[in-house]
Amino acid sequence: MKALIFQGSGKKALEERPKPTIAEPTDAIVKVTKTTICGTDLHILKGDVPTCLPGRVLGHEGVGFIEAVGPGVATFKPRERVLISCISACGKCEYCRKGMYSHCVNGGWILGNTIDGTQAEYVRIPHADTSLYRVADGADEEALVMLSDILPTGFECGVLNGKIQPGATVAIVRAGPVGLAALLTAQFFSPSDIIMIDVDDNRLTLSKRFGATATVSSSDGKAAEAIMRLTGGRGVDTAIEAVGIPATFGLRKYSCTRRNHCQHRRTRIEGGPPFRATLVTQHNDYHPIGGHFQHAHAAQDGPISEDQSQASDYPSFPA
């Protein structure tokens, strides 16, 4: 089969690899029909993810058909159409029983990291019963693949953790796929204002179509000042950071200053150690979602960002 292989910092190649086989009774083999590129893949290619070693098949998002299942798989059978979760969950460990599947001690973010991933014609899925989702015939695969990682990241990591309330003011930094997912799902909670910040005017125009009440271009380096003007000097209730780089962490910090209340929270980025962030907010929180499966990229209108441009030469795979 064809597969995209990480060959070390700054290096990748499309190679011929053996088709994966069942290794554990709870495994499934999925024939991948759609996959996509996450910002985490770009971090890997930059050499920023030490757990991903050269020789690894990249990718943790996809849609496909069950090719084979192990004897311990009860929920799925061959030829069924499935959505692949970016998180592999055993469903039995302490963290899974708490609903913290990304912290699964027998899984978590392993696809395209510590085991071969989805940017290939076939992929082995551990813990298939709790790591795959059946999808209806005729569903749009290009839309479905956004549910592997991108849409739930914006909603769960950004909107739900941000505790958005009716009448709140929300700022979302960067209008890429994850930021737009946060924009769409934030509207479930009826905030009064949603301010989108980006350097790309095409993305900001799209944000207005998707429901943003205001947009701010950060190309002049004065986005924080613009947010303070828009909010009458009060700042915002919730700021969602949807990029994962120091510059945007800083912008989020200085856009949430209603009471200048400084908090410190230890946040575990999936696949890596905890980090400490300085948070300045009104009463909710500052929510960085950049990091593994918190920084994904997909097709969009208009020019792509500098980070995304590095992915423009990714090969496509046959259906």
Image (cartoon, rainbow, N blue to C red):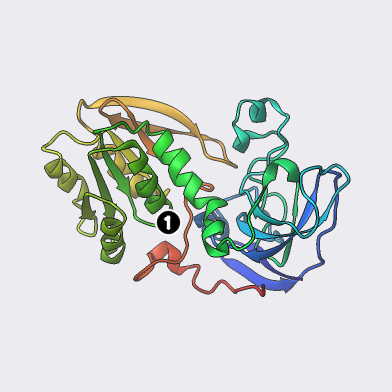
* Residue 273: % across, % down: 56, 36
* Residue 61: % across, % down: 60, 56
* Residue 105: % across, % down: 70, 33
The structure residue drawn at horizontal position 48% and vertical position 32%, both measured from the top left corner, is 267
Outermost residue on the front side: it is 137
Question: 68 left or right of 203?
Answer: right
Picture mark count: 1
Any part of residue 127 in sight: no
Residue 5, quarter of the rendered image: bottom right
Name the foreground residue: 231 vs 208: 208
Circle 1 packing at 10 Å, graded few (<14), some (14-19), many (20+), is: many
Task: Label 1, secondary structure: give it.
Answer: helix
Residue 177, quarter of the rendered image: bottom left
Please state, as top left, top right, bottom left or bottom right, where the N terminus lies in the image: bottom right
Outermost residue on the right side: it is 71
Mark 1 residue type = Pro
Any part of residue 248 in sight: yes
Question: 237 left or right of 3?
Answer: left
* Residue 294: % across, % down: 48, 47
Question: 159 left or right of 101?
Answer: left
Q: Which residue is tagged 1?
A: 177
